[in-house]
Amino acid sequence: MNEILSKARLAPGKLNRAELRMLLETANPVELYQAAYELKCRYSGKKVSLRGLIEHGNHCAKDCFYCGIRKSNHAVNRYFLQIDDVVRMARWAYEQHYGSVVLHGAFVRLGKKSTGTNGATRRTSSERKQMILNKHIEKAYQVLNGETLKEAEALALTEVSGCDILDLVSLANKVRDKFAPAITPCSIVNAKSGVCSQNCRFCAQSSYHHTGIETYGLLKESAILESAQKIYDQGIRTYGIVTSGCGYSEATAEFRNLLKIMDALKAKFPDLKICVSLGILSEETARLLAEHGAWRYNMNLQTNPERYAELIADTHTIEEKISTIKQLQKYGVSICCGGILGLGESWLDRVKMAFACKELGVNGIPLNVLLPIKGTPLEKLPVMEPADVAKAFAIFRLVNPDKMIKFAAGRETTMKDFQGLLMLGGMNSMITGGYLTTRGRSMEDDAVFLKQLSCFTDTQIKKENVR
Ligand code: SF4
C-alpha cells in the first residue's frame, strides 16, 4: 500500500501538505476510494459523515463553475463530498490547479481526530478495528508473492463483510494487475436456440421449462459470418459459437455443418479466435473440432461438481463434462470453464467450484450471475447482492491468480452501478454486446468502460484479442 496513505490511515491528523500532494500523485485510486469509504463508515455513526472542508482562495485563482474551491465561491467552504466523488475530484483538482493544495476535503477527514475534553486524540475500539486489515485478507496477500491460497483460507474469506469487502476487492485488483494484466473482451452468437433435451434448472432453453424464448435450429453459415463480421468490425477478435443441446457424441450432419462454418470463418477472418460451446463431446468430435481450428471450448462446471446433479441437472453427468474437457485438452484446445453464481449454492460450493476449475487446469473462467428466468425452477430465487458477487469474483481471482476470469451473463442486470467494482475485483474479461437469451451492454459502451478502468491499475492494461 502507498506509504503516505498507510500513514494517513494509521496516524490520523499527521499528513502535511507535501504529503497530501504526493498522495494525490501516487496513490492507487482504489485505495483512496477505500480509505474514503472507511472514513464514511467511521464517522457517519457520529453524524460527521464525510464533510469536505475545502481550503481555498489563497491557492486557486481559477473559477471553474462546479468547483467548491473556486475563487467566487469563498463563502461556500464546507460541503458534503459524495464517496465516489473523492477520487474523481482529487484527480481533477490536482490536475487543474497544477500543484496547489486544493483537496483538503477528504484527506483532512483522513486526519479527523476524535478528541476528548483535553483535546487528546482518542479512538474508539471500532475505529481501531477499522484501521487493521482483516486477518484473513492479510493472510491472502501471500498470493501476491506467488503463493497459493488453500481451500480453508479461501473459505475464511467468504466471511469478510462490510468495509472489508473493499479490502478484498483491492487485493484481487492487485493480483489481477500482477498476474493477469490483459483484458479480453469477447462476443458470442447463439447459433442454435432452445428445444434442448436436458433439464438444466437455470436454463431458458431447456424443453423441460416453459420460458417462451425464441427457438430456432442451427443458423445458416451466412448468418454466422454476418454476425462475426459485426463483432470483427468492432475490433473484437474472440468469437464464440454457442448451440443449445446436450452435445455431439458423434459427427452428425449438423456437427459437420458446424465444422464447415468454422472453416469459412477461419478463411474469412484469419486472425479471429474461434471459441465453441457445443455441449458434451466424444473423443472423435473433440478431435474434429481441434482439427478445424477451435481455439477455445466453453464447458462450464456450473457449480460445485459434487452437487451438480442436485443443483443443475440430472439428464447428464458432471463426469461427462469433465471427460469432454480432458479430451479437448489432449488435442490442444484451451478451455473456458466456469459457472453460475446465485442458483442456490452455498459459499462452500463457490469455493469448491473455484478449486475445481484450478485443478482442471482451465485457461479461462466465465462466471455468470443467475438472472432467474420465469418458467424455470429457479424463477423465484432472489438475485445476488452486488457485494456478494464482488466477493465471489475476488475469491475466484485469488484462487486462480493468472487465469482469464470473465463476467458472462448478469453483469448489467445484477451489478448495475457496481460493474466497475468487479473489474477492480479481479475480472479481466467480459462478454460484450449481448448474451444467449438476454441483451447486454453495447460494445461501444464497454470500450469506454475499459478505457476508464485503466486508471485503476499500476500495470498498463493490455488488450488481448482486440484490434
Ligand atoms: S444443456 Fe445447455 S442448452 Fe440444454 S438445458 Fe442445459 S444449459 Fe441449457
Image (spheres, grey):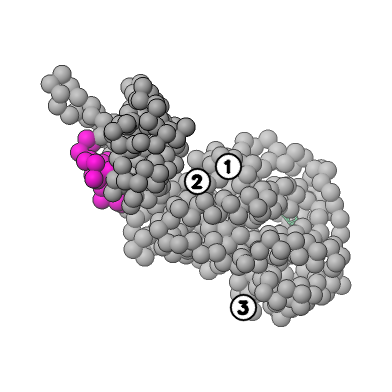
Residue 130 occupies quadrant: top left
Please say if 268 is above or below 69. Answer: below
Please say if 80 is above or below 229. Answer: above
Of residues 424 and 79, the one nearer the viewer is: 79
Which label number is shown at residue 332?
Answer: 3
Helix, strand or loop for disc 1: helix
Residue 73 occupies quadrant: top left
Residue 297 in the image: x percent, y percent? 66, 68
Ligand 1 within 8 Å of the CB at mark 1: no
Magenta-colored span = 1-20
Mark 2 neighbour density, 10 Å: few (under 14) some (14–19) many (20 or more): many
Helix, strand or loop for disc 2: helix
Residue 159 in the image: x percent, y percent? 42, 42
338 left or right, relative to 373: left
The nearer-to-camera label among 2 and 3 is: 2
> Which residue is situated farthest in the top direction here?
117
Helix, strand or loop for disc 3: loop
